[in-house]
Image: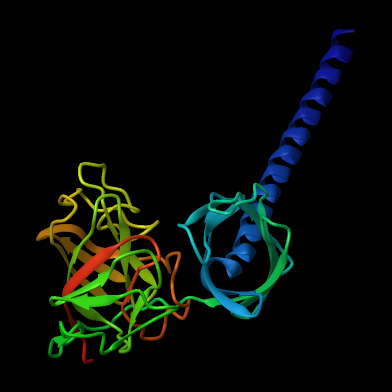
Amino acid sequence: MKKTIATHLKKLSKLFQIAAILLVTSLASQANHSISGNAADSSIEGRWDMTISVDGKEEPSWLEIKHSGTHRLIGHFVGSGGSARPISKITYSGGKMSFTIPPQWEKEDADLSFEASLKGDQLTGTMIAADGKSYTWTAMRAPSLRRTKAPVWGAPIRLFNGKDMTGWHTNGPNQWIVENGVLRSPKSGSNLVSDKTFSDFKLHIEFRYPKGSNSGVYLRGRYEVQIADTKGMEPLSDYLGGVYGFLAPREMVAKNPGEWQSFDITLVGRIVTVKANGKLIINDAEIPGITGGALDSKEGEPGPLQIQGDHGAVELRNIIITPAIN
């Protein structure tokens, strides 16, 4: 009897050993599958410059896709307006990508839905907007814009002559006027765009706004540095000196409404440094992509200076840009 029990115990021990080996093998296989699957997903990771076709008009947008651990793709989306929106989950398999995001500034309460196919370095897909309408879109990989050597600066250019709007145009009916050497937008209206375009540059600009107003300076027409009445508030990316939706200033240095203030901004590739009212508030930080309200999503090309005039009143003077010549 004792011998029979011992024999059964030995058999059970062997069965447990076999089961343990099978379990370990299975877990290893699942881990390898997860890793290999994640490696396949990496083909879609990165930053994408998007263009959404809305009623015959090209609306600039931006998409970032990255992995979170070994099981998920996540990201950020910037539309033609608003700030960068987080994407909690992106599905990608067999060259097909999809995700949904909640509305931000849309009037409707429905989620926005995106799907696309990846072919080479291009995404082609559709978007279902919060109002239920469907739009097509395409996206190309965004350029890194990294420099291999430091820029050589050219001669400063005074973009505003203090007399008239020579060298500038608006993106709609013009409400901008020049009075006593000051370029003014007395009310919400059109944005102001420089005729000249630039790649890397150093910018000095002085501005003044009434209480509660909001404006911004778009570098290359794509990256907005906020102008806003936010004295005494916590430094956030959508307050004075922030790169809208992406980079917050290290401190809030806004003055009172009605006082002249200044930005000194250096943009080299994606790397931006911002001094506001003489204080360094952003230092050599990377701008990931375009901000809402950008003129276009062609990040690899030179672009103009754009002043936001469609939010609130603002006044400008001493707009001086020093472009890189190499």
Q: Nearer the viewer, residue 130 or 33?
A: 130
Write the residue at 22% across / 67% down.
315
Position of residue 102 measured from the top left corner of the image (x, y, whole percent): 61, 49
The relative height of residue 19 versus residue 59 in the rendered view (above or below) is above
Instruction: Tell me what residue is drawn at x 35 percent, y 68 percent.
Output: 308
Residue at image coords 59%, 51% = 103
Query: Residue 278 versus residue 47: which sits nearer the camera?
Result: 278
* Residue in the image at 42% along x and 65% along y: 291
Q: Which quadrant would the N terminus be assigned to in this image?
A: top right
View extreme (top): residue = 1
Residue 141 in view in this figure: yes
- Inspect this view and state whether residue 225 appears: no
Looking at this rendering, what residue extends furthest in the left direction?
278
The quadrant in which the C terminus is found is bottom left
Q: Is residue 86 left or right of residue 150?
A: right
Q: Nearer the viewer, residue 205 or 30?
A: 205
Up/down of 299 relative to 5, above or below: below
In the displayed structure, does residue 157 sit left or right of residue 55? left
Query: Looking at the image, is 164 positioned above or below residue 113?
Result: below
In the image, residue 12 lies at what x, y percent? Answer: 81, 23
Would you identify the image quadrant in which residue 314 lies?
bottom left
